[in-house]
Amino acid sequence: MKVNVQSVNFNADQKLIDFIQVRLDKLEHFYDKIIYADVYLKVQNTSDKVNKVTEILLSIPGGDVMVKKTCRKFEECVDECISSLQRQLVKKKEKIKAYV
């Protein structure tokens, strides 16, 4: 799966990008027809400590799946997004199996 990572208001280091790639690769165990993933990492300019925003857009046949989370760390956001995407992909796969 091709992963595009875009960081807004900061430069993402290679360690974070590799972490995202590994986590997204695990989604292929649940749904094997993922075309690509767009990951948007943003830092909001607020005094609140919960200012890291992660959006993940998965392109799959029949439509896209998008998740947006806000947390203290990007790693935490990515983990929450992945678990949410995992649930959505399992539901989508079950719907497809119901029609077959």
Image: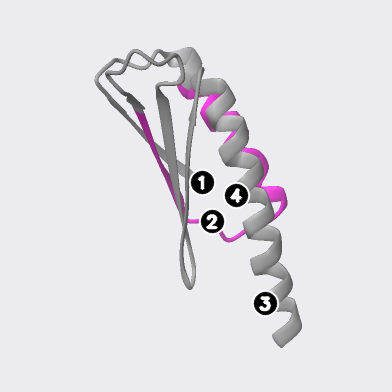
Q: Is residue 71 above or below residue 94?
A: above
Is residue 31 visible from the viewing direction of this image? Answer: no
Q: Position of residue 88 (x, y in %)?
A: 63, 58
Q: Which residue is mark 3?
A: 96
- The image's mark for residue 34 is 2
Drawn side of residue 25 relative to residue 48, left or right: right
Q: Which residue is mark 1?
A: 1
Q: CA distance from mark 1 to mark 4?
A: 15 Å
Asked if the residue under mark 1 is in contact with the one under mark 2, i.e. CB atoms within 8 Å, the reply is yes
Q: Which class describes the residues within 10 Å of circle 1: few (<14), some (14-19), or many (20+)? A: some
Q: Position of residue 9 (x, y in %)?
A: 24, 20
Q: Nearer the viewer, mark 2 or mark 3?
A: 3
Q: How many marks?
A: 4
Q: Secondary structure at mark 1?
A: loop
Q: Nearer the viewer, mark 3 or mark 1?
A: 3
- Identified at 46% across, 20% down, the residue is 50
Drawn side of residue 6 relative to residue 99, left or right: left
Q: Which amino acid, mark 2? A: Ile
Question: Which circle's residue, 1 or 4, is located before the other in the chain?
Answer: 1
